[in-house]
Amino acid sequence: MKVDIEEFQIVKRKGKEKKEIKVNETKTMNSQFANSVHSFTDDIVSMMFTEFDGKTLGEEGFTKDDVMKHLFGEFIPVGIAASPPKVKAKKEKDPNKPKRALSGYTYFGQQNKDKFNGEMNKIVDGGGEKPKYVAYIGQKWKELSEDGKKEWNDKAKCAQESK
């Protein structure tokens, strides 16, 4: 087996090391591994010509699975074995677990829902396009002063504590 091997020479010039290509030659590789690979490949190619002569890869009887089964029988390497996909078990929810506290923004929207729906219906009756509910609440929340927002945050906190 022949392999191209580049040999490098390290040259020092003005205190700096630099790699330079010395030669580019072809050397014969005579190792036990290379010989084993060559022999194995030769055996497989010879078997393919004999066993599957005249067939086209992919047709009935000459698929990748057919070739692998012919070469290795029922052997399946570790890690490739077909195992059913792991399904994560759903975490059971505790029905007694207390609900998370509402934010002032959410509580504001809940408490003013009927009022905001009425205002949005007036917009539609006036010939305008009905705004999205969340966008409308967001706009109203932004119009509140910091004191107004703090008041709604406190109300939400009190409502959670009273439950």
Image: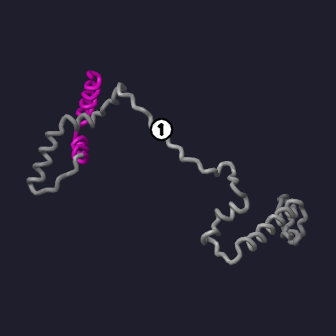
Asked which quadrant contains residue 65, the reply is: bottom right
Is 86 located above or below residue 50 in the figure? above
- Tell me which residue sits at (83%, 66%) in the image: 38
Q: x, y percentage for residue 36? A: 85, 62
Q: x, y percentage for residue 137? A: 23, 43
Specify the quadrant that holds the C terminus.
Answer: top left
Is 163 located above or below residue 18 in the figure? above
Residue at numbered disc 1: 89
Between 41 and 115, the residue placed more toward the observer is: 41
Q: Which residues are magenta?
A: 134-163
The residue positioned farthest toward the top in the image shown: 162
| Residue 19 visible in image | yes
Specify the quadrant that holds the N terminus.
Answer: bottom right
Residue type, label 1: Ala
| Residue 13 visible in image | no
Q: x, y percentage for residue 88? A: 49, 40
